[in-house]
Amino acid sequence: MSTPAMQVRSRIPRLAGSAVERARLTVVPRRRTAAGRAPFLALVSMVLLGGVVGLLLFNTSMQQASFATTALEQQSTRLAAREQSLSMDLERLRNPQRIAGAALKLGMVQACSPAFLQLGTGKVTGAPCSDPNPLRINGRPPVKPAELNPKTKVVRVEASATSGNSAGDTAAGNADRAVRDGKKKSR
Amino acid sequence: MPATTSPRGTRRGSPQLRLRVGFVVIAMLLSVFGARLVQLQGLDPNSYAQMAAAAGQRNVVLPAARGDILDRNGEPLADSVDGLMVVADPRLTAPDAAEIATFLYRKLNVDYPTTLAKLREHEIDGTEARFEYIARRVPSTIATEVIEEAKRHDFKGLDTRRDPVRDYPAGDVGANLVGFIGTDEPLAGFERTFDKQLSGTDGSARYEVGGGNRLPLGESTVTDAVNGKDLKTTLDLDLQWYTQRVLRQTVEDSGAESGFAIVMDTRSAELLAVADYPTYDANNATASPKADLGSRALQDVYEPGSVEKVLTVSSLIDLGLVSPRTKIVVPPELKREDRAIGDWFPHGTIPLTLAGVIAKSSNIGTVLAADKFKQGQLDAYLRQFGLGQRTDIGVRGETPGLLPPGNTWTHQMQDRIAFGQSVSVNGAQMAAAVNTIANGGVRISPNVIEGSATTDDGKQVGTDHATRKRVISAKAAHQTMLMMERVVDPDVGVAPGAAVPGYRVAGKTGTAQRVGAECGCYDGTDTVSFAGFAPADDPRFTIYVVVQNPGNGGGGGSVAGPAFSKIMSYALRRYGVPPTGTQPSRLPVDW
């Protein structure tokens, strides 16, 4: 039997015996590293601390967002309410009754029957005019009961002085009235 | 060593004893905890769980916004505003009752004495009052301002709660149809009929709070509110307002009891205005009598009188039995069985054409013409015109009117029905019937809701459901229109006051005897009315004005005619309808 390995071995010169002896594998004693515990502990503490602080910050920011949400929600509600009341005011201002009153106050008149201005030709169909019997935009005030609405008592006084011209008459009448007024006041 | 240990041992006792004592103490403590655990978890776990959940948890109703009621242009007739109620706790307000009452009186315009009484300590049913309403339905901006100012003044015991405000910006305009909302629920009109659609569905939210703020990771469930849907009507706010004011003036000036006016778009039968007088302010509905809160135009029955004659003669023309030029000899009085029929104006025997009968509103002439009907024919036509059936436009409590069944008609009844007595209608029915003639013989079912809406009873109403049906031929409608034009003719007609200068107007007056509520007989009062359309040869609006019991003794032509003219003139102007420029009818009225 001549395997190639044996052939190789047989070819190695015996001279290298001591070297071979030295090159024999032996168990190496475990090498003790001198790395301290401190960095590891620091790292773990850092991770822990970082986690806790991060969580805290995250939580805080969420809380802050929640505060902001609440504040913004309140503001939104307030603004919506304001918008609604303003549009309510606007609708009340748009009430045709109010507009009609304001228009009358400005001196505007009501139209009678429709009249048309043809834009192309400039021709006017119908006669624009103001309504001779304008619409009453307010109802009549309620009728007062008779007790609150006594009839005006009219007393006709015959003129005492029948002579003289009209101017004199008036003057006399005025004098008469002045006397009567004076009497009334003195009473 | 023993020398040093022995004194320590004597001080602390033996370690064994110490251990035992320690174990006993721990065992006692643990058994106390164990007992408490059994109590919490074993005996009544739910109530504690609930208490734990309730602390810090908040349940909130997310209110649905109530839909608006709009006119045809989107202007609100009723809208909702965020509102609050101001409430007080009398125990807390009592010390400053007078100052707070003065403050509230100034800010919220509440009644001072009533408020003062509420703010003072008092008892309700023997218990101390802790809750009083001070003001309800206050717009929330105002209420919040008031409460903040109260805080600045250091007034205690005032608070607010949600209380939506329903606002009717135009007050009485359209109020009779729109209705109103009472303290807690809709009480009348569309508000009540379409409540389901308008109110929507409230939502809810549940979340945990801490210090007034929502906990970000806490439990949270939200069901969104479904807002109510707007209700769009076919009414025109400005035209409605004008119609109401004209009607009020008419009723006031004629010393009448009540009245209503209807403006209808001829081509679509949409109601542009439905005015009632007396009416009420929807923002303060309870101040008005209950009788004024509904819509007389749809809920009152009355006999239409001579306006109905146009339905009779148009049916006769449609049957080909008469024409506008048919000659009729009208006697001063017409004996029918045991009764005599007379005209409103004294006359001898006069020769009138059918056009003259309409222009002069002769009962006798109409009855003589109606003699040509076969049994049941007039009844069939009137039903096709829509008499005797509800219009179902979505107004509560609408009356169907009263058209006796055809097989019960006697000869005398047909005579009376032919000129509009012994038959009762509601306003919308009659307006739709006259509109049939204006619309060339095709009756369109009237509508006041735009699009489609469902009433709380589940009925579908609205313009989407409008039906069209030919009742009389276009030719018959045209000839009837030509006769109706003679009514407003200043020379031959009875209602020159209804004319609109520059326009062709067709119309018909009505003066009917009224049936008294108590006696069930004609009580000597009248219903006067005018129905018509313009421009006569291309109608755009059909207007019907009815005035009940005018105190000045006026008739349809003198009371309702001018009101018709004013409203028509305004409608034509508002919608920019120019005159057609054709010649009005010159049909002969006599021969």
Image (cartoon, coloured by chain):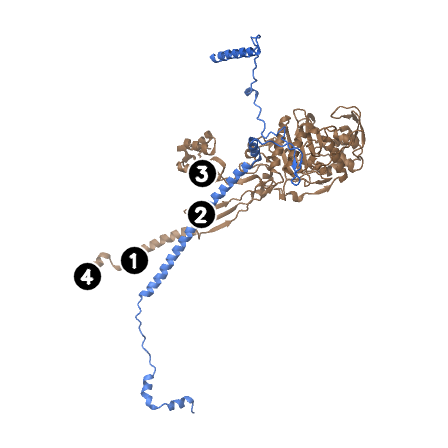
Chain colours: A blue, B brown
Q: State whether discs 4 and 3 lie on one chain.
A: yes
Number of the front mark, 1 or 4: 4
Q: Amino acid at mark 3?
A: Glu
Q: Chain of mark 3?
A: B
The image quarter in which residue B553 lies:
top right
| Left or right: residue B326 compared with residue B77 | right
Residue beneath the point at 40% across and 33% down? B96
Q: State whether discs 3 and 1 lie on one chain.
A: yes
| Earlier residue among tags 4 and 3 | 4
On the image, the x and y values in percent for residue B548 come to: 66, 28
In the figure, B85 relative to A139: above or below? below
| Helix, strand or loop at mark 2 | helix
Q: Chain of mark 4?
A: B
Q: Is residue B550 at all visible to an observer of this figure?
A: yes
Q: Which residue is mark 4?
A: B4
Q: What is the distance, in whole Å, between disc 3 and disc 1 at their CAs? A: 71 Å
Q: Amino acid at mark 2?
A: Thr
Q: Are marks 1 and 4 in contact (CB under 8 Å)?
A: no
Question: Crowdedness of circle 1 by 10 Å Cα count: few (<14), some, many (20+)?
Answer: few
Q: Which residue is mark 2?
A: A70
Number of the front mark, 2 or 3: 3
Q: Which residue is mark 1?
A: B20
Residue beneath the point at 52% across and 48% down? B224
Q: Which residue is mark 3?
A: B145
Closest to the observer, B491 or B144: B491
